[in-house]
Amino acid sequence: MENIELVIGTYENLMLGYKVIKTKNELYSLDVSFTDDSHRGALRSIGVSPIGILASSSTDDSIRLHNLNKRRDIGGLFEHTGTVNCLTFYGTSHMFSASEDGNICMWKSKNWEMLRTLKGHKSHVMSIAVHPSGKLGLSVGSDKSFLTWDLVTGKMAFQRRLKELAQIVLFTNSGDHYILVYQRKIEVCSLEDTSTVKEIPLAWRINSVCFIEGNLIAVGGDDRNVIIFDVLSGKQVLSLDCAKPGDKTFNSRVRSVCVVNNEEDKLVVAGTAIGNIMMFKVSLKESQEVVELVLFYETRVRVTCLAAYNHSAVIQSNEKKEKNLALKAKKKRKSKKVEEAAGDDNKKEEADSRVIEEDSNSEEDDAVMEQPQKSPKKNPSKKRKLNGDIEKSEPVERGRSRQKKVSIQPQKEDNKKKKPKQK
């Protein structure tokens, strides 16, 4: 359980990290892992990516970045000119920040380049939510505005005005619905036609909400209890009492709620305005629903926000990546061997084909040699001039080398008949 880490933001400009340690009797304790005082104002939002990148925002208009795995300060983002109210990670690739300057910034998590600035709100942006597909975004403003964004193009797709001020917007895990959180009410809407599916009224002000699993949502507010609802049916499933053990008269506002994703247990964590941290072990089986307080810790600081991070998830993902890389390398080696074998076969086939061609060529040559040679045709039209200025018709030989032409001259004395001498 030492792989679970809680990060808490405070009014005192501090950010505190705690390791969750499992003790005897199925209980837990907290051990301080780090403290950070880089902000110059009260913290407003904390977000942790699946690979351990911690982002925190404050009333000092800045965003600070840390690597929880390497225990390293990455730096800060200073694009906004107002308090950053909301930080939302989309997987490991992008982060979105919503500010009171009316802008929403889209950041690339790899190098923290600002890709786009979504402009459309005329007042403070309270919250932003990203659809599981990553192509659609929703945001709400302090002027009761509700905006829909095309995150592929960075342009506003739809705008409408709400009847009340919504302070939080969230997508369900399936992405088929979204919820609007008002001061004392939760409205569940269909994404297909934006119609209201369910309304859940509450008697106290809502400060924080988070999905636990499926359609179950944990709600914390000015009441000392954390209520778990089914958002589609509106039914209350569980109630978690955040009072100090042994003092049921004690009442404190629940400022933030989060869920610890652990293979062993389902843990719901709540932080109060006076600095108490409560952790509940929750069983959500249909046959039996059990709640057990497994941790109570006093931080002695005023909590504004909190988040949880599971280091073992990164270890498992790294192991999975290594296995995938090893499998890819193995497949590559295998395909290379197959290609080499195919290349050898091709070379062998080419050599065999060359031998066959040579044999066929030799057979053709033998057949040509056996055929009787035809006498060349005479071309009477072609004439040749010899030495003696006599034109004679001479046959033209085709396919053979011409013999050397010999000039014939008449003999003067030999050709004449010798006359006997007269006496």
Image (cartoon, rainbow, N blue to C red):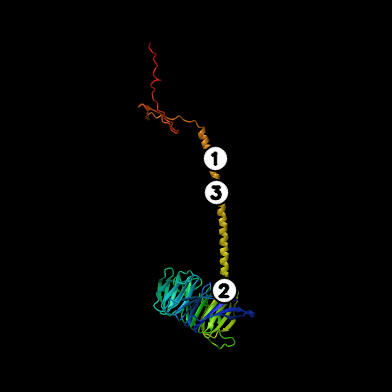
What is the three-letter code of the residue carrying label 3? Lys
Q: Nearer the viewer, residue 188 or 361?
A: 361
**In-image side of 412 versus 323 (left or right):** left
- Badge 2 crowding class, 10 Å Cα cut-off, few under 14, some 14 to 19, many 20 or more, is some
**In-image side of 417 versus 172 (left or right):** left
Mark 2 secondary-structure assignment: helix
Query: Is residue 362 at least partly visible in the picture?
Result: yes
Q: Which residue is mark 1?
A: 359
Q: State which quarter of the image contains the N terminus.
A: bottom right
Q: State which quarter of the image contains the C terminus.
A: top left
Q: Residue furthest left?
A: 389
Label for residue 311?
A: 2
Q: Nearer the viewer, mark 3 or mark 2?
A: 3
What whole-number distance in Å separates the C-alpha atoms at marks 1 and 3?
A: 18 Å
Residue depicted at 56% across the width and 56% down the height:
336
Q: Earlier in the sequence, mark 3 or mark 2?
A: 2
Q: Nearer the viewer, mark 1 or mark 2?
A: 1
Task: Say how many tags the image has.
Answer: 3
**In-image side of 39 versus 3 (left or right):** left
Q: Which residue is mark 3?
A: 347
Image location of residue 68, percent across then percent down: 54, 75
Q: Earlier in the sequence, mark 1 or mark 2?
A: 2
